[in-house]
Image (cartoon, rainbow, N blue to C red):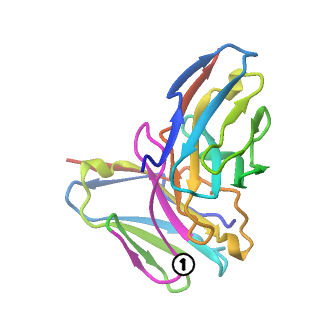
Amino acid sequence: DAKTTQPNSMESNEEEPVHLPCNHSTISGTDYIHWYRQLPSQGPEYVIHGLTSNVNNRMASLAIAEDRKSSTLILHRATLRDAAVYYCILRRSVYSGGGADGLTFGKGTHLIIQP
Amino acid sequence: NAGVTQTPKFQVLKTGQSMTLQCAQDMNHEYMSWYRQDPGMGLRLIHYSVGAGITDQGEVPNGYNVSRSTTEDFPLRLLSAAPSQTSVYFCASIRDGSSYEQYFGPGTRLTVT
């Protein structure tokens, strides 16, 4: 799977929007962009994923650049409970030859929320 | 739905002991995986399964065995525990092969002395 690059850490204020960037310049046409987060002492939690178009769900929005070489996870109104490590992961679907061998987690971005 | 459950939450072993980490899911997912997470690092894949009776190795399989006799259960066995296996272990099930949305259990914190 192609590699992603994320900042080590970011800081934001409570109740403000947060934009978490991810670069993936070697992404292939069949790679999905996944975001997971891991709260302290918990297992990772699925946040959102997309292929080409921007995506919204109850947790966040995913904005994907037109050339797909970068994406941004948007938390519209951060709360203290959003403080976590956020992982941006590329994954080819199983049906496109990606196999079923799990996700490759890097070190992610440690998001700090100030009250 | 309970989702993905793991037992035990905590375990201390002596070097050379064996044990089984239990993982179960009630979402009828075909794909399941085991990861380990060492301090300050991302998750690394140990073993995975694409269905009952089918398992394969991930990135760090040495010292671990798995089996998948049912869709629901995917136990991880440590054959002869070593201090290098001190870690937090996460089990995950995967919603489908297209979206690859994974559901993780709460983890088992294992210490080997």
Residue closer to the observer: B49 or A102: B49
Q: Is residue B69 visible?
A: yes
- Does the segment drawn in magenta span residue A38? yes
The chain letter under disc 1 is: A
Residue B84 x/y as whole percent: 70, 26
Residue closer to the observer: B14 or B76: B76
Image height of B39 relative to A66, above or below: above
Residue B107 x/y as whole percent: 52, 37
Question: Which residue type carries mark 1?
Answer: Leu
Q: Is residue B41 visible?
A: no
- Does the segment drawn in magenta span residue A53? yes
Image height of A17 relative to B89, above or below: below
Residue B21 x/y as whole percent: 62, 31
Residue A16 x/y as whole percent: 22, 62
Residue closer to the observer: A63 or B36: B36
* In this rendering, position of residue A50 left or right of residue A2: left
Please give the name of the residue rendered at 66% of the width and 37% of the height, measured from the top-left corner. B75
* In this rendering, position of residue A8 left or right of residue A83: right
Q: Residues within 10 Å of mark 1 (few under 14, many from 20)?
A: some
Please give the name of the residue rendered at 58% of the width and 39% of the height, measured from the top-left corner. B23
Point out the stretch of residues depicted in magenta: A33-57
* Residue, disc 1: A51
Please give the name of the residue rendered at 35% of the width and 70% of the height, measured from the top-left corner. A57
Residue A58, image quadrant: bottom left
Count of numbered badges drawn on the protein: 1
